[in-house]
Amino acid sequence: MHARQLTELAAVVAAQGPVLVESSLPIPQTSIEEYWLGSKCRLDRWGRVLRRIGRSATPEQPAETRRDWPYIRGVIEEVLTGELLTRVWTAVLAAHDRRLGVAESEPVGRGILISHLEARHRVLSLMVSGGGIGLRWAVRLNALRRRCERWSDMLVGYLTGVDPQVAEFAVEPDRARDFAEDLGYRQQLAGGRQAWPLVIASLRGAFRQGLTLSSPNGDLNLRIAESVLACLPADLFDSTGLFRSIWVTRLTHATADAEGMIERLVAEERGHATGRGTNPTKLADRLRELG
């Protein structure tokens, strides 16, 4: 499974997470164990690659000059983009445990998140050290990092509607709350049902290009995705057991569809932006920034 698909899964988890939390149904512990095992294996693989690059790369021979750079780049992209799902899923697990008054799934999610952030720190160290990754690629990867952070806050912000405390899992909790406010306001307007499909379409557009064609750890990405999907409501599965995810039943057919929706929402906002001050924050503008 490609890292890009995990960003789409993160959006599905954000959309379906409140249903799981409010159902108060127990989360299958076998699925949580699978999530832990798959994540730990991937973290170990990441760690070996990043440590090797940290030891061998020099200013005269940065990582991108190596023959195995496509693989290294893929690992770095997995670390950065995978953070969306890790943060969102941890937020769902924390909210679910709080709703039931237990501490069963959240410790697992929080532990994986902490380890993921350690891998992220190693990546950032390579980007800023001057001896790991050259300036041109550091700039490109830093742009990806910033894009992932904003999208993480958008998706975690959506979950604050079911549990405000999950804002702690955002990169910038205040920004997550702002995103949640914008999305909530949009959903109350006429045509508000388009708000969440617009978010999904914009996310897909944001990660459609710029990533490597394959993921070095696609097998573990799939294992992690399957463990998460096994915890979500059953109505996400059709009669054959196939997940009706965004990459199967597409919410939009092209980026052009998303652009058209943005223009319609902007037009609607001009007619409905009342009670939010003289300069209301527009969800459409937010999504342009994210993209």
Image (cartoon, rainbow, N blue to C red):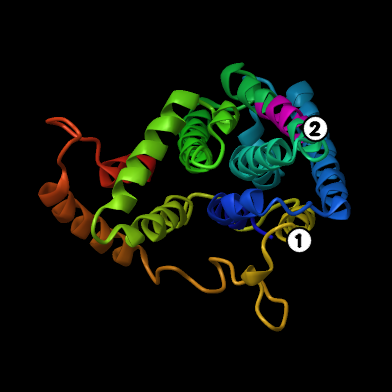
Q: Earlier in the sequence, mark 1 or mark 2?
A: 2
Dot 1 alpha-carbon crowd within 10 angstroms: few under 14, some 14 to 19, many 20 or more: some
Residue at image position (40%, 72%) is 253
Q: Nearer the viewer, residue 85 or 159?
A: 159
Depth check: give the residue in front, 272 or 246: 272
Percent of width and height locating residue 155: 50, 43
Q: Nearer the viewer, residue 116 or 210?
A: 116
Residue sitting at x 66%, y 23%: 121
Q: Magenta stretch containing residue 115, yes or no? A: yes
Identify the residue position indicated by label 2 in the image: 107
Q: Position of residue 9 (x, y in %)?
A: 60, 56
Residue 73, disc: none
Q: Main secondary structure of the magenta part?
A: helix
Please provide percent x and percent y for residue 109. Answer: 75, 37
Disc 1 is placed on an element classified as loop
State how far apart marks 1 and 2 are (Cα). Answer: 19 Å
Q: Amino acid at mark 2?
A: Pro
Q: Amino acid at mark 1?
A: Ala
Identify the mark at residue 230; answer none if there is no mark.
Answer: 1
Q: Can residue 291 be seen in the rendering of this structure?
A: yes
* Left or right placement of residue 38 versus residue 216 in this view: right
Residue pushed farthest bottom? 239
Q: Is residue 212 visible?
A: no
Where does the N terminus fall, quadrant-wise? bottom right
| Span shown in magenta | 111-120
Image height check: is 90 above or below 233? above
